[in-house]
Amino acid sequence: KRTLDDGRLEVVAHVRNREPRRIQVQINCVFKDEQGFSLGDETPFVNLILTENAQEDVRFTSLNPKAKDFTLRIRQAH
């Protein structure tokens, strides 16, 4: 994570498939304030298709400069 010049938070997630098969997942980011409360600044889910042992970087940027922390959510796509 890093803070941009305008105060917004940027997060880069390194997502790796450790399965011996191709998988499809969805990932999003929920940005939080200093106390850990959600700011309502939540990104839409992004679809990722990862082959065996593949790694892909996903970048998220907050809309609000009050964001100081985050939670990444990953779920299996159906």
Image (cartoon, helix red, strand yellow):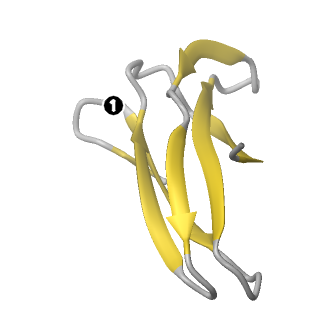
User: Which of 22 and 34 lies nearest the eye of the viewer?
Assistant: 22
Residue matched to label 1? 7
User: Which of 51 and 66 lies nearest the eye of the viewer?
Assistant: 51
- Residue located at (66% from left, 76% from top): 17
The C terminus sits in image quarter: top right
Q: How many marks?
A: 1
- Residue located at (54% from left, 82% from top): 54
Classed neighbour count for the residue bearing mark 1: other residues with Cα under 10 Å, few (<14), some (14–19), many (≥20) = some
Quadrant of the rendered image containing residue 64 = top left
Farthest residue to the left: give it. Answer: 5
Q: Secondary structure at mark 1?
A: loop
Quadrant of the rendered image containing residue 60 = top left
Q: Mark 1: which amino acid?
A: Gly
Residue 12 located left or right of residue 22: left
- Residue located at (60% from left, 45% from top): 27
Quadrant of the rendered image containing residue 50 = bottom right
Above or below: residue 25 compared with residue 68: below
User: Which of 38 and 68 lies nearest the eye of the viewer?
Assistant: 38
Image position, residue 13 (x, y; %): 53, 60
Image position, residue 75 (x, y; %): 75, 46
Image position, residue 33 (x, y; %): 63, 22
Farthest residue to the front: give it. Answer: 78
Residue 10 located left or right of residue 75: left
User: Which of 1 and 75 lies nearest the eye of the viewer?
Assistant: 75
Above or below: residue 35 compared with residue 74: above
Residue 7 located left or right of residue 41: left
Farthest residue to the top: give it. Answer: 40
